[in-house]
Image: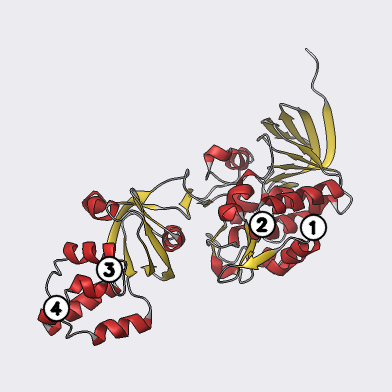
């Protein structure tokens, strides 16, 4: 049998997603010899489908308040040293057309493939050695890191793990990064799907599944967190931006509360129609989707003309509209989750360099770390910022 070749580099990056590609190019731009290993047949698969194929590549409002972590201050250093405007400058350098959709979200006007090409071009410009279909069999460390792969043995002084989380297994997601962390004695915080649709309690299934396809703006709250976005009913549960956002905070034993008429103007108009002779469901249809208004009114026994309700009953109606409880049974899991909450504990890493305190030369960046962003470009910004932090210290 032909012996496997051995190639030595200054830096090995494992993972060809946003964080890995950006870190590799940034490190190579300093003159380091860098190789990137990706087990898929092509790089950037998750980037390609992001933002509906247009890649919500950053959010100009990104700050520590938009991230979940056991240490909420951990991400501050990296985010401060590589801002959304820094990545936007790179996008503009490559003449990629982009636009702001809402609330600071930046999207490609064309295709997410433009961001992939940008990252590839940056790697190629700085002579990063890229390997695809390269399965990693074993990682070890003596004086150097040794990475045994299907394409040969690679050695390096520094090793960067940028393998992402468990979401989107169909795109090749694995627990590789967590296994490497455990191998080197690093702790992992509890893992769970995040930015994910939620599923119904059995008692609510018939009511909600009949509304599949109905969408409406809501304000959803869970403990201290509130998001005002759209809610979408599906055959299995509820989705839409409001649900994806709150899912990162939701716990199974807790109810979610929905303000079904969050707009102040609509609330005032509804309250002023206290004496209307219209059926309540018909009145609510002026402010809510008709299918939802009818089903919701029937579910809660509101079947009379509006003016026939007593003052107490009308106050109870308004209270329920403004704080409608819904108990959910679970999530649709990693196959439908945008990201994984949890990861390599931030207590194990330097917030300035992303290097493991106890293993010199070992770095973790991006989603594999216990830093989870909101929906809307925040996770891409963490990928760029954490990758930049690691690259500057390699």
The spot of residue 328 in percent (x, y) is 31, 55
Classify 324 as above or below 305.
above
Classify 209 as above or below 294.
above
Q: CA distance from mark 3 to mark 1?
A: 49 Å
Q: Which residue occupies 42% across, 58% down?
A: 247
| Tag 2 secondary structure | loop
The spot of residue 47 in percent (x, y) is 63, 50
Q: How would you rate the neighbour count of disc 1 (Cα within 10 Å): few for under 14, some for 14-19, many for 20 or more?
A: few
Q: Quadrant of residue 351?
A: bottom right
Q: Of the numbered discs in the image, which one, if any, rests on residue 313? A: 4
The spot of residue 367 in percent (x, y) is 60, 51
Q: CA distance from mark 3 to mark 4?
A: 15 Å
Looking at marks 3 and 2 on the same chain, the residue that comes earlier in the sequence is marked by 2
Question: Mark 2 highlights which residue?
Answer: 110
Q: CA distance from mark 4 to mark 2?
A: 52 Å
Looking at marks 2 and 1 on the same chain, the residue that comes earlier in the sequence is marked by 2
Q: In what quadrant of the picture does the N terminus appear? A: top right
């Amino acid at each position: 049998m032909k012996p496997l070749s051995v190639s030595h580099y200054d830096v090995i990056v494992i993972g060809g997603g946003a964080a890995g590609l950006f870190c590799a190019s940034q490190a190579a731009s300093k003159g380091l010899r860098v190789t990137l290993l990706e087990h898929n047949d092509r790089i950037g698969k998750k980037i390609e489908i992001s933002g509906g194929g247009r890649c919500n590549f950053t959010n100009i409002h990104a700050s520590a308040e938009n991230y979940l972590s056991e240490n909420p201050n951990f991400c501050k250093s990296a985010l401060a040293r590589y801002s959304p405007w820094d990545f936007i400058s790179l996008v503009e350098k490559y003449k990629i057309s982009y636009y702001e959709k809402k609330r600071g979200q930046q999207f490609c006007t064309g295709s997410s493939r433009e961001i992939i090409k940008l990252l590839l071009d940056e790697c190629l410009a700085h002579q990063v050695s890229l390997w695809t279909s390269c399965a990693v069999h074993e990682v070890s460390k003596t004086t150097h890191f040794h990475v045994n792969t299907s394409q040969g043995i690679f050695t390096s002084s520094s090793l960067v793990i940028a393998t992402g989380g468990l979401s989107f297994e169909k795109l090749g997601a694995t627990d590789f990064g967590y296994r490497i962390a455990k191998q080197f004695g690093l702790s992992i915080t509890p893992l769970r799907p995040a930015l994910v649709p939620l599923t119904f309690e059995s008692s609510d299934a018939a009511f909600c599944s009949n509304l599949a396809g109905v969408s409406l703006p809501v304000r959803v709250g869970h403990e201290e967190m509130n998001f005002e976005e759209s809610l979408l009913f599906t055959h299995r549960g509820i989705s839409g931006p409001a649900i994806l956002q709150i899912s990162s905070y939701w716990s199974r034993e807790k109810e979610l509360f929905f303000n079904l008429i969050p707009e102040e103007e609509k609330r005032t108009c509804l309250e002023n129609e206290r004496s209307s002779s219209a059926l309540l469901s018909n009145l609510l249809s002026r402010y809510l989707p008709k299918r939802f208004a009818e089903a919701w009114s029937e579910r809660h026994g509101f079947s009379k003309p509006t003016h026939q309700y007593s003052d107490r009953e009308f106050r109870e109606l308004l209270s329920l509209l403004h704080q409608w409880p819904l108990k959910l049974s679970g999530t649709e899991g990693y196959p439908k989750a945008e990201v994984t909450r949890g990861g390599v504990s931030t207590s194990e890493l330097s917030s300035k360099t992303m290097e493991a305190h106890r293993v010199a030369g070992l770095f973790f960046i991006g989603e594999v770390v216990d830093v989870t962003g909101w929906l809307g470009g925040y996770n891409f910004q963490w990928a760029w910022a954490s990758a930049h932090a690691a690259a500057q210290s390699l």
